[in-house]
Image (cartoon, rainbow, N blue to C red):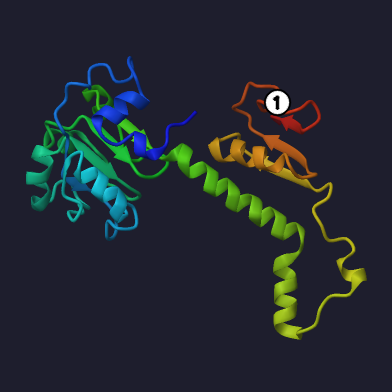
Amino acid sequence: MTPAPRQIYGRRRFQKAFPTPYWEGHAQRPAAQGRVRHGPGAPAPALPPPLLDRLRRTAEIEPGLVVRDFGAPEAAEALAGAEVLITGWGCPHLDADALAAAPRLHTVLHAAGSVRSLVGEALWERGVTVSSAVTGNALPVAEYTLAMILLAGKNTFAQRERFRHTHTYPTPAETAPVGNLGRRIGVIGASRVGRRLMELLRSHDFEILLHDPTSASPRPPRWGPNSCRWTTC
C-alpha cells in the first residue's frame, strides 16, 4: 500500500515509510537545506501553504526564491548551500556548471513528469537522487482522457455547438446512434498514462486496441482474456 502523504515528510516518517535498504546511507543526514526552487511563477500553486508548513518543520527552505537560470548571480549563494532542489516544468538543465555551483546537492525533487530535459550524465555521475511526480501525474491525466472519451462518444461537443446556434434539442432519431456501447478505443503507447487509462476503460463496454511496439508483453497486466486486443503493428 502506498503510504499516505503525511508519512513521507520528515526523516523519521520517511524511514518508517521507506525502510532500509532504500534509506540506507541517508538516515544520518542532517535536516536538508532546500533553498532553491525553480518555477515559471509564484510557488503557491506547486507548494500550497499546508505543504510549505510541513517542509519548514523538516528543512531550511526558501520558497520565495524562484530560479530560472542556474548561472544567475542571485542563484549562486542559494546553490552553494542547497542540498535539495525542488524543480518543475521549464527548469533549466542541470549541467556540470550548475552541479559545480551546488557542491552539497544530493537530491532533486521534480514536481512534474519526465526529467529527460532536466538531467544528464553529469548528474548521474555525481550520484544525485532524482524523484519525479510522473506516476502521480498519470492518474489525473488518464481520468481527464477517460472523461473526454465518454463525452465524445455521447457527441457532447457537437451537440453543444448545435444548441448554441439553434437553441433546439436533437430528435430521438438523431441521437439513436450516439453512445459508448461497443465503441472501439485506440490507445497509443502503454505508458504510465496509457496503462492507467486502460484500467479505467475496463469498467466500460469498449473494444480497446493498444499500439505499443516497444512492449514485449502479449497483453496488459491484470486484464482478462477478452478485455483487450494488443497489437504491435
* Quarter assignment of residue 226: top right
Q: Is residue 226 left or right of residue 84?
A: right
Q: Is residue 144 above or below residue 130?
A: below
Closer to the camera, 50 or 22? 50
Residue at point 30%, 30% (across, down): 13
What amino acid is at disc 1?
Arg
Q: Secondary structure at mark 1?
A: loop
Q: Is residue 28 above or below residue 166?
A: above
- Local crowd at mark 1 within 10 Å, few (<14), some, or many (≥20)? some
Q: Is residue 65 above or below residue 115?
A: below
Determine the residue located farthest toward the right in the rendered image. Answer: 173
Q: Is residue 5 left or right of residue 213?
A: left
Residue, disc 1: 219
Q: Position of residue 33 (x, y in %)?
A: 15, 38
Q: Is residue 49 left or right of residue 214?
A: left
Residue at point 77%, 33% (across, down): 227
Q: Position of residue 135 (x, y in %)?
A: 47, 37
Residue at point 75%, 72% (across, down): 159
Q: How many marks?
A: 1
Q: Is residue 129 visible?
A: no
Quadrant location of the C terminus in the rendered image: top right
* Quarter assignment of residue 86: top left
Q: Position of residue 31 (x, y in %)?
A: 16, 33
* Quarter assignment of residue 186: top right
Determine the residue located farthest toward the bottom in the rendered image. Answer: 166
Closer to the camera, 225 or 102? 225
Residue at point 18%, 46% (across, down): 36
Q: Is residue 148 visible?
A: yes
Q: Is residue 106 left or right of residue 111?
A: left
